[in-house]
Image (cartoon, helix red, strand yellow):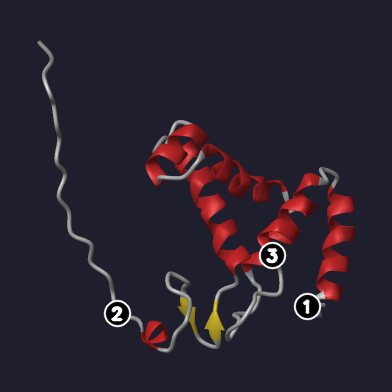
Amino acid sequence: MQQNNKVEIQFRIHTAPRAAAQCGDQPGAPAVAGGRLPRITQVLALAMQFREMIRSGDARDCADLARLGGLTRERISQIMKLLWLAPDIQIDILYLAPTPGGRFPVSEVAMRKIANRLAWPDQHEEWVKLKQSNRLA
């Protein structure tokens, strides 16, 4: 005889009201003076948080992070790849100016391509080109 074991979990989600959400801003993007943080800034900060979770033992590995966050292992790998960037490039990304609206000047895909270049001097060269092409320099 087979038993049907079910577990029901109930929880409430509390959200804080945001003035930016009323203005049609992207949901979930941190509101800051002068716009919202660039997506790449948010994702790099998330990668740093994930790394800290592994270091502190809150998560065992990237597979554990995927389970905890409800993400695929592939997506966790994409996010963590940003940690391969040279430290000064990471700092530049964390301090990108808020964007008032529209598209962000630097995409996550472009930054992962730069991170694929494992030599930091090569990364710097590509980062400078990207900043110039997007008028960030």
User: Mark 2 near mark 3, Cβ–Cβ under 8 Å?
Assistant: no
Q: Position of residue 29 (x, y in %)?
A: 47, 72
Quote the CA–CA distance across marks 3 and 1. 13 Å
Which sits in the foreground, 99 or 24? 24
Of the 4 image quadrants, the one containing the N terminus is: top left
Q: Earlier in the sequence, mark 2 or mark 3?
A: 2
Where is mark 2, residue-wise? 17
> Tag 1's secondary structure?
loop
Instruction: Locate residue 136 relative to residue 27 in the image: left or right.
Output: right
Q: Residue at x 71, y 74 (%)?
A: 105
Residue 136 - label = 1
Q: Earlier in the sequence, mark 1 or mark 2?
A: 2
Name of the residue lying farthest toward the top:
1
User: Mark 3 near mark 1, Cβ–Cβ under 8 Å?
Assistant: no
Where is mark 3, residue-wise? 107
User: Mark 1 near mark 2, Cβ–Cβ under 8 Å?
Assistant: no
